[in-house]
Image: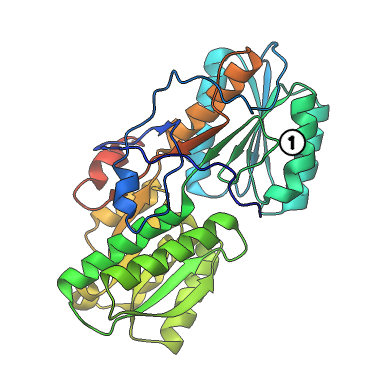
Amino acid sequence: MKKLSMVLAVVLVAVLMFTACTPVDQPAQSASAQATQEDAPADESAAADESAAPVAAGEFKKLGLVHNMQSWQMYQVMEKAIKAKCDAAGVELVVADANGDANKQLQLIETMMNSGVNGIIVVTVDGPTLEDVAKRCTENGVALVSMYIELENATANVLVDEYEYGYAIGKLGAQYMAENFPDEELEVALLRIHDYLPGIERGRGMEDAVKEYYPTATIVNDQNSVDVESAMKMTEAILAGNPNTRMFLADSDDTGAIGAYEVLKAKVKPEDQAKYCVVGADGVPQAFGYILEDGMYRGTVALDNQEIGNTAFQICADALAGKDFEKVQYCAFEEVTKENAAEYLKQYE
C-alpha cells in the first residue's frame, strides 16, 4: 500500500455533534490524538489543488458506488446519504460490493466505467491494485473519488489520519481503565484488520496510546478481525487463552468491537462488568446503543458517515461541473462516550 503522498498542517476541530468531513491539511502523527480531534476545518472555499486529476466537465446523470464491504454499518449510512443526494439531483445510483476483494473491486470499477457512469465513489480495498483503472477513469472524464486509501490517480481522496484515529481509540480505553484501576497489570487485546492499511495504522496508534496512558498494561493478543462473526470467534479464543484480558480495542465497531461486546455480555457477570472495557471506531448506530447501555462498551471514535457520503457526492458533482475541489480531504472525528452517545444516536432515528 502506498504511503500518503501529502503532508498537510494540523487544524483545530471542536465538535459536540457529528463532525463534518471537511477539506483540511493532513495532521502530523503526534503523540496526542486529541489535537487532531480539536482541529478546525479549513476554509471550504479554498482553491482546488493544482495536481488534481483532469476531469472533463459534463452532465451528471449516473453515479457508481463500489463498496469495500457493504455489510458494514458505517458504509450503509454513507450509502444512504449518497442515495439521498442522487435522488435530489436526479442522478441514478448504481451500487456494487467488492466484499473485501481488491481484484473484484477492480473489475467492478471497469464495468461501471464502461457502462456510462459519470462518477465513481470507491471505498478502496487496495491502492496499488486500482491505480491504473483510476487513471483510465479520469482520462475518460469519469470522476473517481477514493475513500480512506489514497490513490494518486484518483480525481480526489477522502481520508482519515489513521494513526491518530487509532491513537484516539487506545487513549479512550486506556484512560477509562487507568482512572478506575490504576497501576494494574492489565491484559489488553487488539481486534483489527491486519492486511488493510487503515487497520495497520490504527493498530500502531492503539498500541502507542496504551503505552502512554496505561504503561502497566500489556497487549497479549493482536487478532485479525474483519466482521462481527470473526470478532466473536477471536474474542472467544482470546478469553480461552488469556482469561484475564479485560480491555478490547478494535479498529472499527463493525469489524471488532460489536463482536467482542456480544461475547463479553454472555460471559461476564453483571457485577463484574465495570472491570471490562470495549472501545471501537467509526461511530455506527449499534455502537451508540451499546454505549448507552452503560455496560462494558465504553466508547467509540466517530466519523460523520452521513457527511462523508455528502462530501464524496459533492466532489463528483463539482469535478464534473468544472468547479474547484480539493484533491485530498481529511475527515474529522470525535470520541463518543455515554455522555454524548444519545445525541449521536438521534441522527439515525
Quadrant (top left, top right, bottom left, bottom right) of the N terminus:
bottom right
Is 94 drawn above or below residue 7 in the view shown? above
Residue under label 1, please give it.
134
SS state under label 1: helix
**Position of residue 148 measured from the top left corner of the image (x, y, whole percent):** 55, 45
- Residue 334 in sight here: no
**Position of residue 152 measured from the top left corner of the image (x, y, whole percent):** 67, 39
Q: Residues within 10 Å of mark 1 (few under 14, many from 20)?
A: many
Quadrant (top left, top right, bottom left, bottom right) of the C terminus:
top left
**Position of residue 325 measured from the top left corner of the image (x, y, whole percent):** 55, 22
Is 313 drawn above or below residue 96 in the view shown? above
Is 59 drawn above or below residue 154 in the view shown? above
Horizontal relation, residue 174 to residue 284: left or right: left
Q: At 51% across and 19% down in the image, what residue appears?
A: 47
Q: At 22% across and 83% down in the image, what residue appears?
A: 184
Q: Three-letter amino acid code at disc 1?
A: Ala
